[in-house]
Amino acid sequence: MKLKKRKGIEMETVNFIIKNFNDVLFLTWEHIYMVGISLAFATLIGVPLGIIITKNELLAKKIINSANIMMTIPSIALFGLMMPVLAIIGQGLGKVPAIIALILYSQLPIIRNTYVAIKNVSPSIRNAGKGMGMNRWELLKEVEIPIAVPVIVAGLRTAAVMNIGIAAIAAYVGAGGLGVYIQNGIDRVYPEMILAGALLVSIFAILVDAGMALVEKVLTPTGILIQKRLSQ
Amino acid sequence: MNKILRQIYSVILALLLIAAGVALQKTGTISIFSDPYAYPELIRLLWQHLYLVGVSMAIATIIGLTVGIVLTRPKFRAYTGIVMYVVSLGQTIPSLAVLALVMTFLGIGAKSAIFALTIYSLLPIARNTLAGINAVPASIIDAAKGMGMTSMGILWQVEIPMAMTVILTGFRVALVINVGTTALAYLIGAGGMGDWIFTGINMMMTDMLIAGALPVTLLALLADFLIEVLRVLLVSKGLRISEE
């Protein structure tokens, strides 16, 4: 079956967005809320975990492998598998399974980037810190984390962009967000609605990607920036 | 310490397996798998799923590799930056949005699903081919030139084997994303295992839901494993040793 293609579907889509502007704002807010909350929790879990596993090779391997397997599971299948489990506490549908899934999916990029960044701090820098009389905690706070921050933020960026896509799919388990337009549009064969949903989600993802790239640049310590410029 | 960790890990794994088994029995998924009427339907959907994944991956691999290789030739080097930018922009677009966009322009059915899946899997393959070949050290290419190899010979015998690990990583990302996105292809009328997942969600039929979600998960894990096997087969022994 071919959808009836009306003339000027682009203009119609823009009109649709303008006419339903309040609705669009609300759905966008829901999307931001889901991605934001999950990213905050994922950072709180992932970054400390990534730092802890730099002390133990075997633990690092197992945890990164588990996160890798987690990431391999298709998102809609994960929603499906979680539904009966969360239904026990009456949360099978809605925002709770969506946020849990988003937290789980964000773990791999965050843990891996934190681990790799801290592992890659050169021993000479670490030794210099030790020579200045820093203890382990100070060394982590003053030396290792500032050097690792750009890479950690890069991991957060990957996670955020991925989460926006998965949150769109979460509309099918009743989590709301911009995926609702795609879902309803497909069900009603309403091309303007589908286009509006797809375009808004895509623009949102591209904007977040660009924004995080900016944050990455801002958070890079000046010393590292100068070093990079000199080496070029 | 490590010994204790290993034991804790295997105990957790065993407990998870037992819990999964009990859950499967409780929700009635086992009975759906062994049901004589549901079983042929499962096989049919699985084939549909594999067909969508197979066809789209085959096209995406051919196009992706060609694009990646062509862009590393000296003639087209100038466009590498632009293409990389477009590709990374394309990858930020969510998979559901790609499917929906393709549906509005091409309509529903397996053909538009294959089109969307191909485009979406093409990006990681092309990008990694490009990055992999570009990362081959210039000294090695110079050595090959010094041995009198033609540019074709350098491509096939030096550049591609050296870039194989990176290309396979891109292929792995593409394949895993493809298996997951194919589950969504049901929404635009292409069938596949998504049929049971979405029907299960809509009708709150837990057994059907799990019977759909489990094969997709296993398929994705199998795809991941397949790439490991391919890595052993395709990456030359010397490179593998030096990596480890």
Image (cartoon, grey):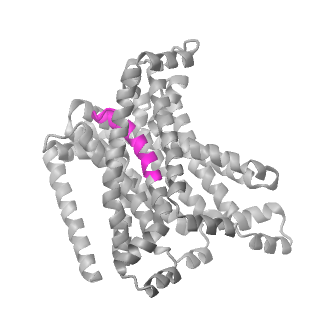
Write the residue at 39% across / 42% down. Answer: A166
Dominant SS of magenta comes to helix
> Seen from this angle, which residue lies furthest front?
A132
- Magenta stretch: includes residue B156: no
Q: Tell me where the magenta segment starts and ends, as one range.
A: A157-177
Write the residue at 83% across / 70% down. Answer: B145
- Asked if residue B18 is positioned above or below residue A208 in the image, the reply reads below
- Asked if residue B144 is positioned above or below residue A219 in the image, the reply reads below
Relative side of A189 to B208, left or right: right
Q: Is residue B17 visible?
A: yes
Q: Position of residue B126 (x, y in %)?
A: 63, 50
> Seen from this angle, which residue lies furthest top?
A7
The C terminus of chain A: image quadrant: bottom right
- Magenta stretch: includes residue A173: yes
Q: Position of residue A100 (x, y in %)?
A: 28, 48
- Asked if residue B202 is positioned above or below residue A146 in the image, the reply reads above
Q: Position of residue A50 (x, y in %)?
A: 37, 67
Q: Is residue B58 visible?
A: no
